[in-house]
Amino acid sequence: MNKGIDYVTKVKFSQRQQDMLQKAQEIIDKEAVSYVEQLRQHIQSLKKSIGSGDITQAIQICHHMQGQAGTFGWPLATEISGWFKRILTNQQNATIDHKTNKIFLSSLENMVKNNLKSHGKEAIGLLQNIEAALKKNNP
């Protein structure tokens, strides 16, 4: 019996398809090991873009993070970067909100520093801190 990838869809994959999917998963798993460094680089790029007032570039970085993070096992990064992207999009047509941007940047740094990949107890605390800080800055 084949011990290949078990898919919820119950689709019958040929052995060749299963082998290709397994190879793809191995590539993703290998890249996931170094993804934390890529997240750090994205955060630094975000800081530079926001610092120079290039909100369009910051949105693109958030979009890139949002797409990659879930693939490489960081669903919390997907959620935070998506939220940040929406906030930055609103800032394109309004005033740049430096306080809110700082909250998101420090939250992303905190997430990476503490290896908060998913919605565990610590991650929920982080999201609650973001929400409280936003409410405090925008009564």
Image: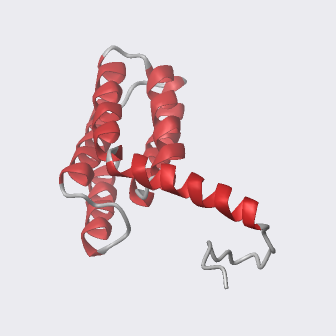
Query: Residue 73 sits in which quadrant?
Result: bottom left
Residue 31 rendering spot, x and y as whole percentages? 41, 46
Q: Position of residue 36 (x, y in %)?
A: 30, 46
Is residue 131 left or right of 84 when viewed as pictured? left
Q: Quadrant of the N terminus?
A: bottom right
**Figure check: 18 above or below 69:** below
The residue sitting at 49% across, 51% down in the picture is 28
Q: In the shown orientation, is residue 9 left or right of residue 88?
A: right
**Residue at the bottom extreme, as displayed:** 1
In the rendered image, the vertical position of residue 139 relative to residue 60, given as above or below: below
Query: As drawn, is 26 to the left or to the right of 132?
Result: right
Q: What's the residue at 81%, 74% (across, down)?
A: 12
Q: Is residue 27 visible?
A: yes
Identity of the residue drawn at 28% across and 61% down:
116
For residue 25, above or below residue 11? above
Q: Please state the horizontal and vertical placement of residue 105, each as a whole percent of the image.
A: 28, 39
For residue 74, what is the image quadrant? Answer: bottom left
Any part of residue 80 in sight: no
- Outermost residue toward the left in this view: 113
Instruction: Residue 110 in the image: state x and y as whole percent.
Output: 21, 51
